[in-house]
């Protein structure tokens, strides 16, 4: 299991990690209602632990976990398990703030001078996220998004300079925040991204909002939002019962 705890930290990379764990898991049916996605087990290991290990392997020595659905259960788990890093909880008790609002709400838990590496708790990614962080920091981009060339209904659109739009192929809706330059690539977001500490100074949105809205607005203002391609076969997610079963089958078959 590449997620095992003997993975070292990301060499010269030191980041603050964020685990986005506030989702309701509605597509998982009864299991999602009774168990938060963060505490669903795959081969005897919770998704929360798996995500923490990946972030630690990428250089995180501080983890921020946002909670809403079954928040008490997740907090009890965190209080009784050592995830291998300094852990902070960002509570969204009144309402779930979505990915952008959740990151903004958690801002006081970050150190302010480190790259933030955010990871959805329902994603299993075996790619080397320390490399993502290194490439992000060397590029000078405001954010670097883990992306895939796979079939989906909703795409983010990238060109030679980075993010410039999005497309929903189910509804036919397409948004461009600037004119594309060079080759256009429609890519699927993998639920993982790195952002520079200055990101929070540029967020004007408040309350409940998705992170994609922020990226698109800032890309339209000229900020570089770049893709990082996840290798084929290195990404899975547990968003519905069939996908959860596939992830369990894969990891339970490993020695």
Image (tube, grey):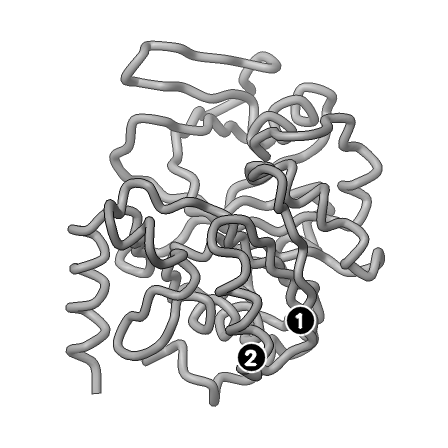
Q: Secondary structure at mark 2?
A: loop
- Identify which residue, 93 or 166, lies in the foreground: 93
> Relative to residue 103, is residue 80 drawn left or right?
left
In the structure shown, which secondary structural element does the residue marked by tag 1 occupy? strand
Q: In the rendered image, which residue does mark 2 sit on?
A: 83
Q: Nearer the viewer, residue 154 or 77?
A: 77
Q: Is residue 173 above or below residue 111?
A: above
Q: 202 or 140, which is in the foreground?
A: 202
Q: Residue at x 72, y 26 (%)?
A: 205
Quarter of the figure with the C terminus: bottom left
Looking at the image, residue 238 sits to the left or right of residue 102; the answer is left
Q: Which residue in the protein does label 1 denote?
A: 87
Marks 2/1: CA–CA distance: 8 Å
Closer to the camera, 45 or 178? 45
Residue 123, horizontal then vertical, whole percent:
39, 56
In the rendered image, which quarter is residue 168 located in?
A: top left
Residue at the (46%, 73%) spot, across then down: 49
Quarter holding residue 183: top left
Q: Position of residue 254 (x, y in %)?
A: 20, 81
**What residue lies at 30% left-to-right and 47% top-to-bottom?**
239
Q: Is the residue 88 above or below the residue 123 in the image? A: below
Asked if the residues shown at circle 2 and circle 1 are in contact, with their CB atoms under 8 angstroms apart, the answer is yes
Which residue is at 60% across, 54% downward?
A: 66
Mark 2 is surrounded, within 10 Å at the Cα level, by few (under 14), some (14 to 19) or many (20 or more) other residues, namely some
Q: Position of residue 7 (x, y in %)?
A: 49, 84
Judged left or right of residue 144, residue 77 is left
Specify whether 206 is left or right of 233.
Answer: right
Location of the N terminus by quadrant is bottom left
Q: Which mark is residue 174?
A: none
């Amino acid at each position: 299991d590449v997620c095992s705890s003997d993975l070292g930290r990301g060499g010269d990379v030191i980041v603050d990690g964020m685990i986005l764990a506030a989702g309701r898991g509605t597509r998982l049916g009864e299991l999602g209602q009774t168990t938060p996605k963060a505490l669903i087990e795959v081969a005897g290991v919770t998704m929360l632990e798996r995500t923490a290990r990946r972030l630690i392997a990428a250089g995180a020595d501080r983890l921020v976990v946002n909670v809403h659905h079954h928040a008490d259960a997740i907090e009890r788990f965190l209080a009784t398990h050592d995830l291998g890093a300094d852990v902070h909880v960002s509570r969204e008790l009144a309402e779930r703030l979505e990915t952008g609002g959740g990151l903004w709400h958690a801002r006081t838990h970050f150190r302010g001078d480190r790259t933030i590496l955010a990871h959805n708790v329902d994603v299993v990614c075996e790619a080397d996220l320390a490399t993502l962080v290194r490439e992000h920091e060397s590029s000078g981009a405001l954010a670097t998004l883990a992306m895939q060339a796979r079939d989906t209904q909703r795409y983010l659109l990238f060109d030679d300079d980075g993010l410039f739009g999005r497309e929903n192929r189910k509804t036919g809706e397409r948004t461009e925040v600037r004119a594309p330059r060079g080759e256009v690539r429609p890519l699927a977001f993998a639920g993982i991204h790195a952002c520079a500490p200055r990101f929070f100074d540029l967020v004007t949105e408040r309350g409940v909002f998705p992170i994609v809205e922020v990226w698109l607005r800032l890309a339209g203002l000229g900020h570089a939002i770049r893709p990082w391609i996840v290798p084929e076969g290195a990404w899975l997610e547990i968003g519905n019962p069939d996908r959860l079963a596939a992830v369990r089958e894969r990891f339970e078959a490993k020695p």
